[in-house]
Image (cartoon, helix red, strand yellow):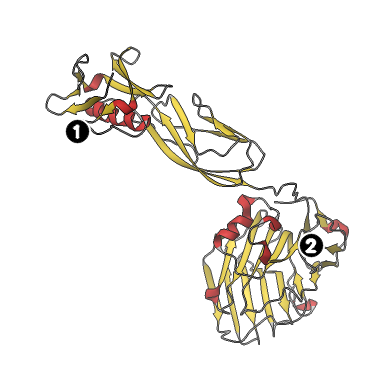
């Protein structure tokens, strides 16, 4: 059988088959479906349970009235035909209803089911990462993959009317190839004054230089608290902390009367969060971006008159303590894991790479790892009380007012 033209005749309300052995048919009794061989079968429907095959055609041999191809794929041709057939009724194509944003860690099972309206009889998924496949009969997608990255998977669901499609965004997160994250460090509030002291001469950068701070945090008691600082106290400080309402607070100050301060986000106690503070080096509120779980947060500007005066040029850096003396600190009641310091303003895409779909990863494998200047694993990979190693440099942290029990097996 050669090419055949199929189209709806609006005057007779019938479908015309431009082929001598097939008679004109009324539209309300015709439906097209795709075969396993990639052909198109047209059926004459007597009832919901009875049908008669009219003919089977290669989809490439079906033309519109003007002689052009009815479609470039079997799905397009089926949809074209059923659009002609539906003038007197006949239902609708499936609409996919299953989740369109999913994530999985590499080499762990991915288990997903395509669901759709309008009685689908066949499912598909193109663009799946290697190792993951779809069951066309059930719509189940299952498998294991190490194809780290973001994949756009085209889901399809077919019924006797046609094919419905939707894009599934599937993120495969890395474990880092042997990388494990087992421990975090607990900071136990004001009674204990737990904090880390860092000899940070190679990582301190001022308010007017580009840098980024990144960490995972789980707050036990939400209150105004110190997370990270360097400088000489209120007269010369770069500071990151929490407000009593759970916002991330970033402050540049030198002297007390000149400061830039912004807040953003809204953490709540009892959950792990990934927090990144990015400073482009302008010394202004516009140059600071605060991310929570890789999403840039709307900022509240408290004060922005630092001008050209640079803050944060001296003294030791601390985690969970303010720079200056102990009396100036507002103590943290929280776990911190995988904290890192970068000598650049991380881009939104780079923050997303670090966030890794909510799973801490090996930061040294990232393509921008040359800008990673300090990485504290918080108990993993050779850390031994009281020393928490800098796993990319020499900016090691010392646990102060703490014991080995502050290193706990509790992670994002």
Residue at left offset 44%, top offset 26%: 122
Pick whichever, 2 or 47, lies toward us. 2
The residue carrying pointer 2 sits among few (fewer than 14), some (14 to 19) or many (20 or more) residues within 10 Å by Cα, namely many
Q: Kindly identify which residue carries mark 1.
A: 66
Q: Secondary structure at mark 2?
A: strand
Tell me the quarter of the picture where residue 342 sits: bottom right
Label 1 Cα neighbours within 10 Å, binned few <14 / some 14-19 / many ≥20: few
Give the x, y percent position of residue 195.
Answer: 79, 68
Answer yes or no: is residue 91 visible: no
Q: Is residue 263 left or right of residue 186?
A: left
For the image, the number of numbered tags is 2
- Sooner in the amino-acid sequence: mark 1 or mark 2: 1
Residue at x-position 49% and y-position 26%: 136
Give above or below for 24 relative to 178: above
- Which of the image's four quarters has the N terminus? top left
Tell me if 256 is positioned left or right of 89 in this view.
right
| Left or right relative to 31: residue 378 | right
Which circle marks residue 338 in the picture?
Answer: none
Residue 59 is situated, as x and y percent measured from the top left of the image, at 33, 26
Q: Is residue 289 above or below residue 73?
A: below
Q: Residue at the spot x=58%, y=62% of the render?
A: 291
Which of 2/173 is in front?
2
Which residue ends up furthest to the left in the rendered image? Answer: 11
Q: Is residue 114 visible?
A: yes
Q: Which mark is residue 188?
A: 2
């Amino acid at each position: 059988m050669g090419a055949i033209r199929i189209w709806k005749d609006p005057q007779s309300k019938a479908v015309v088959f431009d082929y001598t052995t097939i008679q004109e048919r009324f539209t309300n009794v015709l439906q097209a479906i795709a075969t396993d061989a990639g052909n198109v079968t047209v059926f004459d429907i007597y009832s919901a349970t009875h049908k008669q095959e009219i003919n089977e055609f290669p989809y490439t041999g079906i033309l519109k009235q003007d002689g052009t191809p009815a479609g470039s794929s079997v799905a397009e041709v089926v949809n074209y035909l059923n659009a002609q057939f539906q003038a007197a009724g006949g239902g609708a194509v499936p609409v996919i209803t299953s989740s369109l944003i999913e994530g999985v860690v590499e080499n762990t099972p991915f288990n997903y089911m395509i669901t759709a309206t309008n009685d689908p009889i066949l499912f598909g998924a193109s663009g799946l990462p290697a190792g993951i496949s779809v069951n066309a009969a059930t719509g189940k997608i299952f498998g294991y993959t190490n194809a780290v990255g973001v994949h756009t998977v085209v889901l399809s669901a077919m019924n006797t009317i046609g094919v419905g499609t939707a894009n599934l965004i599937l993120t495969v997160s890395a474990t880092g190839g042997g990388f494990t994250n087992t421990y975090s460090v607990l900071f136990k509030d004001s009674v204990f004054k737990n904090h880390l002291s860092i000899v940070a001469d190679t990582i301190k950068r001022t308010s007017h230089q580009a840098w980024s701070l990144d960490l995972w945090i789980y707050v036990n008691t939400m209150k105004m608290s110190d997370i990270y600082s360097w400088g000489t106290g209120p007269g010369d400080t770069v500071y990151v902390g929490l407000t009593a309402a759970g916002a991330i607070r970033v402050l540049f100050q030198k002297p007390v009367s000149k400061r830039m301060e912004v807040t953003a986000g809204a953490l709540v106690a009892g959950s792990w969060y990934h927090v990144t503070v990015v400073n482009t080096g302008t010394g202004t509120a516009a140059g600071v971006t605060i991310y929570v779980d890789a999403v840039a947060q709307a900022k509240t500007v408290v004060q922005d008159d630092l001008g050209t005066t640079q803050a944060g040029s001296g003294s030791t850096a601390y985690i969970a303590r303010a720079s200056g003396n102990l009396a100036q600190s507002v103590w943290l009641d929280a776990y911190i894991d995988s904290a890192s310091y970068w000598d650049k303003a991380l881009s939104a895409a780079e923050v997303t790479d670090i966030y890794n779909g909510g799973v801490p990863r090996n930061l040294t494998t990232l393509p921008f790892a040359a800008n990673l200047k300090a990485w504290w694993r918080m108990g993993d990979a050779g850390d031994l009380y009281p020393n928490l190693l800098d796993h990319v440099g020499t900016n090691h942290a010392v646990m102060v007012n703490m014991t080995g029990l502050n290193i706990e097996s509790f992670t994002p």
